[in-house]
Each structure stands twice: as C-alpha cells, then as structure tokens.
Image (tube, grey):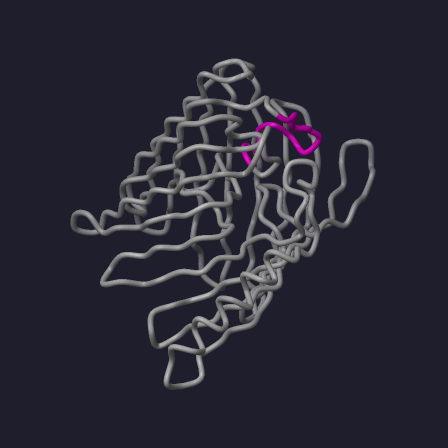
C-alpha cells in the first residue's frame, strides 16, 4: 500500500509542478453491489460483480502537460490470494497526439475483458494504427508465481485480436470468473503460458451482440478453449434484457445467465440475474450498479 501512496504522491507532484494552473481532479465511486442467493438458500452481500468487476473509490488528476494520475481502491477484495493489495489501479499516464503511455498497476489489454481479466504491474503503450484500430501492448511483472509476460490487443470495439505470452496467465480470480464459478481457487504457478483470442461486438437495431473466443495453451493447466456469447436488447424506459453464456470446451463446462438491467436514475441501475450451470439452477443475484 505504501508504494502506491508514494506513486500517487509522485504523480501529483509531477502533474502540479509542471502545470501553470491547478490540475483538474475527479473523485468518485463505482459500485457493483449484489445480494446473492445460491441453490442451498445461502445469502451473501458482495461488493463485486459476477464477472470479477470490483466496487471502488477512485481519484483521477488531469494536468495541462498531458500527465494524468489515476488511483482506485477496492471496496472488497475477493482475489486476495493472488492479488493481496487493496489497491485496484494506480498509474501515471502521458497522453500524446493519439497515443498513450502509462506505468503502474492497471488492467491488462486483452479482448473486451469478458473472459481474460488480469490486474498487472508494469507499463502499457497504446497507439492508433489504422482508422479506428488501436494497438495496445503491455509488459507485466507481477512477481514469482504470478502473471508475468506480454499482453497485446489490436483492433477496435467492433473487432479485435489479442495475444498474451508469458507465465501463470489467467490465475487471477477475475479471469474467466463466470465459467470457472465463484468457488474456484487459483494456485500460484499454475496458469497458462499462451492465450490467443478474438472478439467482436456488433449492434443491429435494438440488439447488441458480443462474442469472444480464447485458446489457452502451454501452461500448468490443461489446454482448453473458452467461448463467451452475450446478447442484449435496448428497450424504452431504460430496460435492457441480457443473455450470457460461457463454455469451457475441454472441461465440457457450460454456464448461462438471464438478466434484466433497469436504469432507475442518473448513474444507477438494478440488475437482477438468474444463473444456471448446464440445466441446473445455481444462484440468483440482485445487483445494484452505480457510478458517481
């Protein structure tokens, strides 16, 4: 925690000392709170989503010199074994003419973060390459037994391709969280060495489709393929029904969810969900999402 406080202080000084004016700042919260009830009628209140999204309190500083600082604190840490820090993100970024360089702790670039979601310590470079396509490359050094290597994604929000190569990839409880189940406990040094992925997002009328396919190879875990499909409708009055299905082809594991997201005010939404494992009911959630 102390090193992230030092990074935040150093970033503040770097932004403030090189600006003629006081840097702009933004402080807020992202809330992903849910009441979960499983098939045994056990109920829990959790401050993170079913897909590994944290609730956080965050502070962002924006300087006239294009230096930015971002710091986010987890409100509940479900991945303490692999990532014991209560800090979610803490990085300094420089915005160039269309490109971006940042260093610190951040989410790794891979797909649309529907399956492979990893917090890494290192550096990331984002470059505009062609039309609306962007190349993102990150070097991760998380330490012994954790995720180390290179992450890369090329594409846009519509279509992209990703690769990650290194060691212990995918061991975070954020990664592949829905298909693995919330009871999955990762082990140090038991991840993948290579991840290859393609992702797409298409909008047709009131429907939106997202598909992501990931090949996992060359690690202490068995080779496998993950497939993720999400379809949603945008209806009047802020109503947004969703269907999501994920599969682990080697394990023949399949989970799916039916949900409805209902906007109830500025920045607030209710998100009831019913989750099944194959044909068996697994759990029901009532999630509240808010950003302010």
x and y percentages locating residue 143 in the rendered image = 56, 35
Residue 181 within the magenta-colored segment of the rendering: yes
Apparent side of residue 136 relative to residue 289 in the rendered image (left or right): left
Magenta segment's dominant SS is loop
Residue 26 position within the rendered picture, expressed as x and y whole percent measured from the top left: 51, 73
Q: In the rendered view of the protein, which quadrant contains the C terminus?
A: bottom right
Residue extent of the magenta highlight: 175-188
Residue at image point 44% right, 33% down: 229
Q: Which residue is at the front of the view, 33 or 214?
A: 214
Q: Which residue sits at x=58%, y=39%?
A: 174
Q: Nearer the viewer, residue 148 or 237?
A: 148
Q: How many labels does the image show?
A: 0
- In this view, the residue in front, 236 or 208, is 208
Identity of the residue drawn at 31% across and 50% down: 126
Which residue corresponds to the image point at 41% horizontal and 48% vertical from the top-left?
123
Q: Picture coordinates of residue 103 (x, y %)?
A: 43, 53
> Is 281 situated above or below 90?
above
> From the viewer's perspective, is residue 90 above or below residue 48?
below
Q: Does residue 80 belong to the magenta stretch? A: no
Residue 271's x, y, as percent? 60, 52
């Amino acid at each position: 925690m102390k090193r992230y406080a030092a990074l935040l202080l150093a970033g503040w000084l770097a932004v403030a000392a090189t600006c003629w004016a006081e840097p702009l700042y933004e402080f807020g919260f992202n809330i992903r709170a849910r009441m979960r009830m499983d098939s045994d009628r056990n109920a829990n209140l959790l401050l993170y989503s079913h897909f590994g999204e944290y609730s956080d309190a965050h502070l962002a500083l924006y300087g006239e010199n294009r230096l930015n600082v971002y710091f986010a604190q987890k409100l509940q840490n479900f991945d303490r074994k692999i990532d014991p820090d209560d800090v979610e993100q803490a990085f300094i970024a420089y915005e160039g003419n269309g490109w971006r360089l940042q260093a610190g702790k951040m989410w790794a670039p891979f797909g649309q973060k529907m399956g492979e979601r990893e917090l890494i310590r290192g550096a990331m470079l984002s470059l505009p390459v062609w039309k609306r396509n962007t190349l993102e490359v990150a070097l991760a050094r998380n330490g012994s037994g954790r995720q180390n290597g290179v992450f890369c994604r090329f594409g846009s929000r519509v279509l992209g391709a990703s690769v990650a190569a290194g060691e212990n990839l995918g061991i975070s409880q954020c990664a592949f969280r829905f298909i693995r189940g919330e009871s999955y406990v990762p082990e140090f040094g038991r991840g993948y060495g290579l991840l290859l992925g393609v992702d797409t997002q298409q909008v047709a009328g009131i429907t939106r489709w997202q598909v992501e396919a990931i090949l996992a190879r060359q690690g202490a875990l068995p080779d496998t393929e993950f497939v993720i499909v999400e379809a949603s409708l945008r209806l009047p009055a802020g109503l947004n029904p969703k269907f999501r299905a994920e599969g682990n082809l080697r394990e023949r594991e399949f989970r799916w969810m039916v949900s409805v997201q209902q906007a109830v005010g500025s920045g607030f939404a209710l998100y009831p969900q019913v989750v099944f494992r194959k044909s068996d009911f697994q759990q029901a959630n009532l999630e509240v999402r808010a950003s302010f």
